[in-house]
Image (cartoon, grey):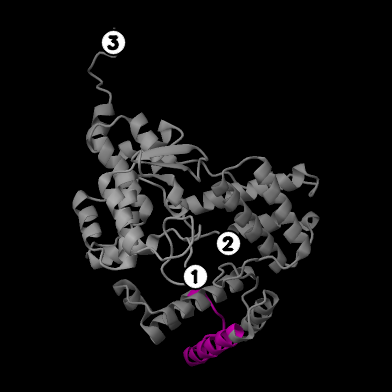
Amino acid sequence: MTNLPFQELTKRLEKELYRLHYTEASVMQYRRMWRRIATFFEREGIDHFTEEVGMHFLDEQFNFFELEKAGKLTQSIINVFRIVRMLGDFQQHGSILRRYYKQKELLQTNEFKQLLQGYQNHCQQKEYSKVTQNHYRKIGESFLSFLESQGIRQSTDIIARHTADYINTLLGYSYKTVELQLCGLRSFLRYLHENGLHPEALSKSIPAIKARKQNRIPSVWTKENVAKLLDAIDRGNPAGKRDYAIILMVTRLGLRTIDIKHLKLSDLKWREHRIELIQSKTASALTLPLLPDVGWAIIDYLKNGRPKVASPYLFLRHLAPLEPFSDEDRLHQIVVKYMRLAKIPISPHKKKGMHSLRHTLASRLLAENTPLPVISDILGHISSDSTAVYLKVDVIRLRECALNPEGDWHHE
């Protein structure tokens, strides 16, 4: 998309907002902020919008960078930040890429809605795990929504340039996110060709990313910081009781976030002192011991913290609607909240979500000489190869793996 003057950019963006069924009240909010940005541009002698000048506006008007560094951004400032990012996306790609409204369906045309449903049925027939099915459906939906914004209405009109333009929208995302997006996009395009919905095998135009699982080093916590994190939780209020039980289940049992969110009351086998569940990622059964501290934390939450609503799920949101956490919620905000309360440094170079606590358990088990196959069973890995990456955080064991060039390689 050409670098449009700011007035023309907002005119086209407003048209796209209406196409996506944004409410009149929402569009008015966007208009008010656009006028404020336009006034700033006029004073600064700026004609065209870029995210760089948009961030300059944010910092001058709202002291954005200092507040962000201090962790004191208000929701209203975050909303302005989203408007700036949306303008940048639309200027560069002619599409609204980041969705900040609670709309169930992104697609506007019946043709693409039916196409997505067919692809979803295909993934189910392939017996992909529920997590993979969910990821692939969302990737297919995002790609089709992007095509709609480009004026494409039939699958046969898709050309390689469209896939390349969509891939360009992924610039700046993490390696893992891009890898997942390309994998899902390749699957969707393969489905189109193999089912006679497109004459070309466009999946072959998707660039391959060399797998680098063994190149990444998991982020781990020190024992002291894990203790500080748990101590910072106020277990006197209902949400604190829930958060304490959740974090304890990750640090002590290594459960994935998705499995914690899907955990049902019936999965708790109190008489047998164990937890039995079907993992969302692998669709395989997992049995873990219901450790005493974990069990008492859950009991405290059930008796004194959990909302009194009829739900089969163990952990619920404590603000309306009182229901389980969504699959999109990674519970990252819970960890960050207590890191700040515990005054644990938040480094941009280290992961700080629930998954890093799961990594920490694996590394601790490794340090205690627990065999990799056992750690693999605890974490629910299908293969010990997935667990081997934790060797990278254990320098002592890495040294043990090194070959001695002076030694005898021929053991009897």
Asked if the magenta segment contains residue 407, the reply would be no
Q: Disc 1 on helix, strand or loop?
A: loop
Residue 210 visible within the image: yes
Of the two numbered discs 2 and 3 on the same chain, state the one appearing first in sequence.
Answer: 2
**Front label number (3 vs 1):** 1
Tag 3: amino acid? His
Q: Is residue 9 above or below residue 144?
A: below
Quarter containing the N terminus = bottom right
What's the mark number on residue 169?
2
Tag 1: amino acid? Pro
Instruction: Give the image location of residue 312, x and y in percent.
Output: 48, 55
Tag 2: amino acid? Thr
- Residue beneath disc 1: 321
Q: Residue furthest left?
A: 224
**Front label number (2 vs 1):** 1
Judge by depth and name the residue closer to the eye, 300 or 343. Answer: 300
Of the two numbered discs 3 and 1 on the same chain, state the one appearing first in sequence.
Answer: 1
Position of 214 with respect to 304 (left or right) is right
Quarter containing the C terminus = top left
- Residue beneath disc 3: 411
Within-10-Å neighbours for mark 3: few <14, some 14–19, many 20+: few
Q: Is residue 353 above or below residue 273?
A: below
Instruction: Give the image location of residue 323, x and y in percent.
Output: 48, 64
Please name the residue shown 33% across and 50% down the image. 249
Instruction: Give the image location of residue 99, x and y in percent.
Output: 57, 69
Please name the residue shown 25% across and 49% down the image. 293
The quadrant holding residue 318 is bottom left
Q: What is the distance, in whole Å, between disc 2 and disc 1 at their CAs?
A: 33 Å
Please name the residue shown 34% across and 49% down the image. 250
The quadrant holding residue 359 is top left
Judge by depth and name the residue closer to the eye, 141 or 276. Answer: 276
Q: Which segment did they paint magenta?
A: 26-51
